[in-house]
Image (tube, rainbow, N blue to C red):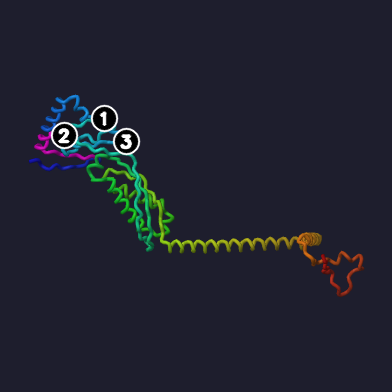
Amino acid sequence: MEKDAIATFDDGEPRVSRSSSGGLCTYLLTAISVFFIIITFPLSLFMCIKIVQEYERAVIFRLGRLVKGGARGPGLFFIIPCIDNYTKVDLRTVSFDVPPQEILTKDSVTVAVDAVVYYRIQNATVAVTNVEDYGRSTRLLAATTLRNVLGTRNLSEILSEREAISHTMQSNLDDATDAWGVKVERVEIKDVRLPVQMQRAMAAEAEASREARAKVIAAEGEQRAARSLKEAADVISMSGPALQLRYLQTLTSIAAEKNSTIVFPLPMELFKGLMGGPRAGESTSAMPVLEA
């Protein structure tokens, strides 16, 4: 009776210890298979020689045991029919979508979040021997990790710190899948969907914030305009001719409006030479009225 073999791992590669009776049986069956290969040569070459692509590796099992030397490839490799079988492993980067997950955030808000994960096989032998289906296992672990990581964050953090969340998920997944020979290269948060009520509340808050900023900006503009008008009035009041020029500019702008009646102040100093100076109690200016 063959004794149970004990599998140990050294540097990521499985090592299998074989019992003496199992080794003898293996050698006997191998010798018989090689004999049939020789007597059927060269037809047996079509069954013995296999090819794997540059991006593939072949993990060979002989009588259910892992063949020494690790994964084969790329290129040609040799198997013994009837006692050998092999599994091809693709080493290229694979991506998959994490289905939308209903997550309750730390501040008790329910959101639906989905993501995309990129991974590749870094050890073909371990990926075949340590886990039944590394692709399905990685997908399930990614969905669980997404819920666990986002469940510890507030809604504001989920919306504003996607890069940090993606990095945390990538680190957690990579550590968990290292024993499966899988390397998680990148994780990206695709979309965060909020409830309709929450969207309306956030839109109202954003609108109120924009209105408040607009009022502050308008008030600051009026303050600067008032300050400028005060400075201009101070400059004009220091010069009489400048004040008269301002009157003329005002009359020009009023006359351009096609008004039927124009009322404007006219300094009486202009008529001092004709009127012999103002009498006692009379004002030094008048308000002429011009009819169009």
Q: Which residue is mark 3?
A: 55
Crowd class of label 1 (few under 14; some 14 to 19; many from 20; radius 10 Å): few
Residue 251, given in percent of the width and then of the height, sits at 79, 62
Q: Amino acid at mark 2?
A: Cys
Quadrant including the N terminus: top left
Residue 135, given in percent of the width and then of the height, sits at 29, 46
Q: Amino acid at mark 3?
A: Tyr
Q: Earlier in the sequence, mark 1 or mark 3?
A: 3
Residue in the image at 81% along x and 61% along y: 244
Which residue range is magenta in the image? 13-26
Note whether 114 is above or below 196 in the view shown: above
Q: Which residue is mark 2?
A: 82
Q: Residue 21 occupies which quadrant of the picture? A: top left
Residue in the image at 39% along x and 49% along y: 188
Q: CA distance from mark 3 to mark 2?
A: 27 Å
Residue 18, given in percent of the width and then of the height, sits at 13, 38
Note whether 89 is above or below 77 in the view shown: below
Crowd class of label 3 (few under 14; some 14 to 19; many from 20; radius 10 Å): few
Q: Residue 75 occupies which quadrant of the picture? A: top left
Q: With 34 as the anchor, is 59 left or right in this view?
A: right
Q: Are marks 1 and 3 in contact (CB under 8 Å)?
A: no
Q: With 290 as the anchor, is 56 left or right in this view?
A: left
Residue 139, given in percent of the width and then of the height, sits at 30, 49
Q: Earlier in the sequence, mark 3 or mark 2?
A: 3
Quadrant including the C terminus: bottom right
Observer-nearest of 106 and 57: 57
Q: Earlier in the sequence, mark 2 or mark 1?
A: 1
Task: Give the structural element (helix, strand or loop) at label 3.
Answer: loop
Q: Which mark is residue 45?
A: none
Q: Which residue is mark 1?
A: 76
Q: Residue 78 occupies which quadrant of the picture? A: top left
Q: Amino acid at mark 1?
A: Leu
